[in-house]
Image (cartoon, grey):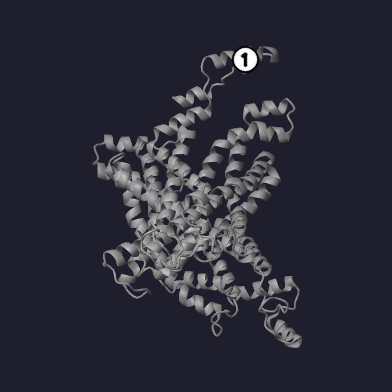
Amino acid sequence: MDALDNTQPADGTLNPEVTSSSQVSILGGAAARRHRTLWRDAFNRMIQNRLALAGGVFVILIALIAIFAKWIAPYPYDKPDFAAINAFPGAPGHLLGTDEVGRDFLSRLIFGAQVSMLVGLGAQIIVFVIGVPIGAIAGYAGGKVDTLLMRFVDVMYAFPQLLFVILIMAWRGPGLTNIFVAIGITGWVTLARLTRAEFLSMRERDYVLAARAAGTPPWRLITKHMLPNALTPIIVALTFGVPQAIFTEASLSFIGVGIRPPRPSWGQMVGQYFANIQSYWFMAALPAIMIAVVMLTFTFFGDGLRDALDPRMQRR
Amino acid sequence: MGQFIARRLIWLIPTILVMSLLTFALMHLTPGSPLQPLAANANPLPPDAQKNLAHFWGLDKPLWQQYLIYVWKALHLNFGTSYIYRTRQVTEILRGAFPVSLELGAMAMGIAIIIGVPLGILAAVNQNGPIDYLASFLATLGVAVPNFVLSIFFIVIFVIGLHILPDTGGWKGPQDWVMPAFALGLGPLGILARYTRSSMVEVLRQDYIRTAQAKGLSETRVVIRHALKNGLIPPLTIVGPMFAAIGTGSFFVESIFRIPGMGRYFVDSMTARDYPMIMAVILLYGVFLAFMNLAVDVLYGVVDPRIRLS
């Protein structure tokens, strides 16, 4: 029902008599009857979904931990404590134990959150910057440009993504920046497809035709008229891209081509400590738990966000 | 139909060519040539010997010729000699490893289909009931948790904690199969259950289902005889790509459980920069994925004649 309110133009611009001079007063009237935006509605729906809300709170919590890692972590991630090597969780001074050179496990996990969040969110920026323009141009221009771009996208699609990422990492070498590059190069395909589909369906809509007839230049038409209407699915796709990117980073670091040690990453910790699993099971299990929790959190949050932004898609 | 398949097969050629070109380019961009006299830790060979070696490996030819030679050899399934296992051809190694990966993938896929599809159907029939919630929980868990993380959990719980399964590795008997197959299969299981549920929910609301119910057919009969036919088409479409994805996803699971499949060789070759091996594995997976997609498209038309293949 909320969605219905939304679809009506809030300021009555459809009225042909409206001239630019009278627009102000009409907008004022709309504000007076408590005008609700799409975002406000989505927010309201979001807080009603408990699981998604919990996910959102957790996402913020982990983000805060990542931002303030330096101050929260009891030790630097690479400081060895030779008095307590391979300490089990609960050892004095080390809440979650230490690793084989006595580095504090809790601190390493906290700094690992930094890597995961950086990769998860940062990669989405790159994906957005590459994927949306390509999709938008293909969808807007249509014809040969569209065919060409989409053929390219098809070929990229045929490539097993994880293999491609690994290959790029082999080329560029391990490191955080290169992980961004690798995920960016491979990850934009899905978003480009999505944006293109949205733009294609919008191209012949009345408001786009009207804007075009009024002489709006293509650049302005794309950014001001079409993109805002395609934003909802794009945001949802980006939200689901976050756990995807976190997973990719964890996998890369797990096989040793991701984050360069001594900087800790959860995937790298799992891969590294897995060899000791019989004696020190917690070393591999704790980062594994962190990965699982963060992935689940983002998935719940993404599910909730999708339902909130697009109530028609809601699961019955 | 035949025309459709033929056209799709022809499309495969440029796709695989681009794939091989990208792989080839990336390999050559990657630092660390075997013949770089100026690089750190380079082999201290006299220039003449290096020249001879470069000639022997064909590295003195222009790049495009090298690429063409590579493609020509790859067409004859000759991927060269592995850098790690120097006495063995890449093709020979993969011939031993691929079936193992395929077995693991088939087991995982089997688990996903045998448990996932019925779970999705049950969830759709009992909407918002306990089974529905269980299915949705499993689906989220399977989708969200990476399989190497699941593998760690399985090992910690079943081997170290409960001592139910022996602490082995390899690929000999059921005790070696259970954990990797489930670790690999849980994700696809979740996705399949989710897909099946939503498509069944859609189908169960259609008029012809109501007609069947109105005729007085039992609920089981309505679901099995009438709803399933249409309801299983969407899940079917994802089975193919999923199977290919399981193949690539198995790297981690294989290396954790020490299974002598392609994944383990791939991870090893990655760390050792065994380029011939890496390229062969990537091409193999690419071709596999493309054929899987084709197979699904064809099956799609067979199952649902309303869909015109174009």
Which residue is rendered at x = 32% and y = 35% of the image? B210
Residue A66, relative to residue B22: is it above or below? above
Report the amino acid beneath label 1: Asn
Residue A112, relative to residue B124: is it above or below? below
Q: Residues within 10 Å of mark 1 (few under 14, many from 20)?
A: few
Which residue is rendered at x = 71% and y = 81% of the image? B54
Q: Is A207 displayed left or right of A73 in the figure? A: right
Q: Chain of mark 1?
A: A
- The location of residue A116, given as percent across then percent down, is 51, 53
- The location of residue B100, given as percent across then percent down, is 42, 72
Quadrant of res B133: top left
Q: Which residue is mark 1?
A: A15
- The location of residue A303, given as percent across then percent down, is 44, 41
Quadrant of res B110: bottom left
> In terms of depth relative to the viewer, which is nearer, A223 or A263?
A263
From where the camera sits, is residue B10 visible? yes
